[in-house]
Amino acid sequence: GQILPPQLMDQMISSTCGRRTTIVIISACFSGFFVPALADNNRMILTAARPDRSSFGCSESDKYPYFDACMLQQLPSAHDFVALGPAVQACVAKKEQETGMRPPSEPQLYVGPGLRPILPLMALKPDTRPSG
């Protein structure tokens, strides 16, 4: 019954992560609402939707919301965070088009100015688990 205020989330992240590079992923309807409060020099923020849009795939018939499914699908093949954000955005847009969901959720991606030059160097560890 309570909503986490964006400023409180910013305080929690700041007190926990400090000035370290921080990747924030928020999977929720209207989650773009958090971006202005969380935007910082050392952060990348990826949200499931714009501040004024819902996300899709939250029904009982869906295993995961579209955003979560796309994140899980794209993580193994993304070589770094720079590639991950746009890949998830494109995946969500494709799922929404295929299922006729309107208006599109338009997942948001913010990369802090201090993080832009080093983010491409932060490779994601490849999945070395056996497939199957």
Image (cartoon, grey):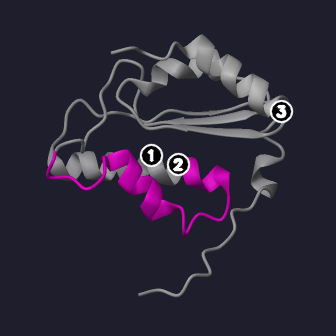
- Whole-number angstrom distance, CA of label 1 to CA of label 2: 5 Å
Q: Which residues are magenta?
A: 60-85
The residue nearer to you, when weighing 5 against 109, is 5
Q: Which residue is mark 3?
A: 114
- Whole-number angstrom distance, CA of label 2 to CA of label 3: 19 Å
x and y percentages locating residue 42 in the rendered image: 79, 32
Check contact, mark 1 vs mark 2: CB within 8 A: yes
Q: Which residue is mark 2?
A: 86
Q: Amino acid at mark 3?
A: Gly
Residue drawn at x 38%, y 23% is 30
x and y percentages locating residue 103 in the rendered image: 24, 29
Label 1 CA crowd tier, 10 Å (few <14, some 14–19, many 20+): many
Q: Is residue 92 left or right of residue 20?
A: left
Does the magenta segment cover residue 90?
no
Q: Earlier in the sequence, mark 2 or mark 3?
A: 2
The residue nearer to you, when weighing 95 against 131, is 131
Residue drawn at x 29%, y 28% is 54
Q: Which residue is mark 1?
A: 89
Above or below: residue 11 compared with residue 116: above
User: Looking at the rendering, in which quadrant would you find the N terminus?
Assistant: top left
